[in-house]
Image (spheres, grey):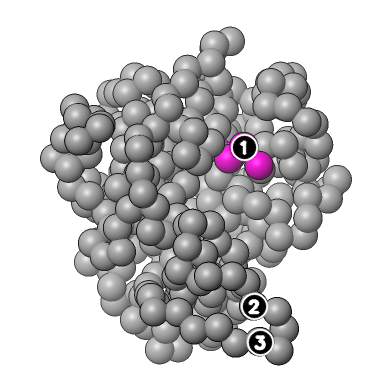
Amino acid sequence: MINLIGNLNADLILAHVKERPNFGEEHMVDHMMFRPGGLANLIYPLVKLGVKPRVIATLGKDDFGEKIYQEMLPMVEDGITRTGTPTAISVGVVNQAGSRYFVTYSGNLYDFTKEVVQNARDFNKAKASFFYGYFLLPNFGFEGTLTCLKQAKANYHLTFFDSNSDIGGWSEKSRNEIINLLPYIDYFMPNDEELLHLTGLSTIEESISLLFEKGAKSIILKQGSKGATAFINGEAVYHKGFPTEAFDTTGAGDGFNAGFMFKLLTGGSIEDSLAFGNALASIVVSRKENRYPHLDEITALLKNPFK
């Protein structure tokens, strides 16, 4: 079993915006999706691959929260805490090139504390724990994350960690917190922009070297259309990804995370896990609907990447 720990919220995605409007302007789009977001972007691909993860998150008791909860419940081991605060909603605006930005109503994300994790049934029985959305969970924060990482390691879990971007602008405090968590994280999974912001350095090579000096074990670097690189055991293992025409890049990194973790936990090598994660992510971003592939679709892409 895999523990997925982090934010679960509603996503409203407005896609194929020609240009970002200024305040006082209004633009129309022809593509809109309303769906569960946050951890849901890992839940869906894992479920398609036959995994039933334990989801440890909060949701409000409002209509949005109830809809997400009822949709998730058949797919997951239930570690979701329902609260009286309205459910968080993230509005994503995607341009025609697939790039996007978000505006998020925080809602019930403030209700996520270390007790939500510690009270989750069978947390300790998992094979792995994935920590997600660090900067969106202010009342979990450093102390809560550290406590639960230590709990996971005490129970021999492999630990995976994707902080996402710091919504506060990568302060010195934020950088120090993430760096001080590294010794408890088996696979740290930033993208290249997050990596450079975290270290404050100008190159990937310098940044990777610094994080290993600070106690990092393995770093899995997501590089968008350029693929992904694993820095592990003093070596760099690179996979260039797959040619893809992106419709919506929302969830690309999450799809990679799900694919990499799935392949690794089912006995794949680092090389195979990078390729699998990239293949899953490339399919996700290329689709408007039915975004998450079955195993045979991923396998077909791996066998014939230029079809």
Report the Cα–Cα distance between label 1 and label 3: 33 Å
Sequence-wise first label, 1 or 2: 2
Vertical placement of 58 versus 120: above or below?
Answer: below
Looking at the rendered structure, the secondary structure element under dot 2 is loop
Is residue 120 visible in the rendered structure shown here?
no
Is residue 226 visible in the rendered structure shown here?
yes
Q: Which residue is mark 2?
A: 21
Residue 189 left/right relative to 42: right
Q: Does the segment drawn in magenta span residue 190?
A: yes
Looking at the rendered structure, the secondary structure element under dot 3 is loop
Q: Indicate the position of residue 11 as horizontal and vertical percent values.
A: 46, 72
Q: Residue at x 49, y 84 (%)?
A: 28
Local crowd at mark 1 within 10 Å, few (<14), some, or many (≥20)? Answer: some
Q: Does the segment drawn in magenta span residue 294?
A: no
Marks 2 and 3: CB-CB under 8 Å? yes
Q: Which residue is mark 1?
A: 192
Observer-side mark, 1 or 2, equals 2
Name which quarter of the figure residue 64 lies in. Answer: bottom left
Q: Amino acid at mark 2?
A: Pro
Q: Indicate the position of residue 156 as horizontal and vertical percent values.
A: 45, 30
Q: Residue at x 72, y 36 (%)?
A: 196
Sequence-wise first label, 1 or 3: 3
**Along the line of sight, which residue is nearer the eye, 229 or 125?**
229
Q: Which residues are magenta?
A: 189-193
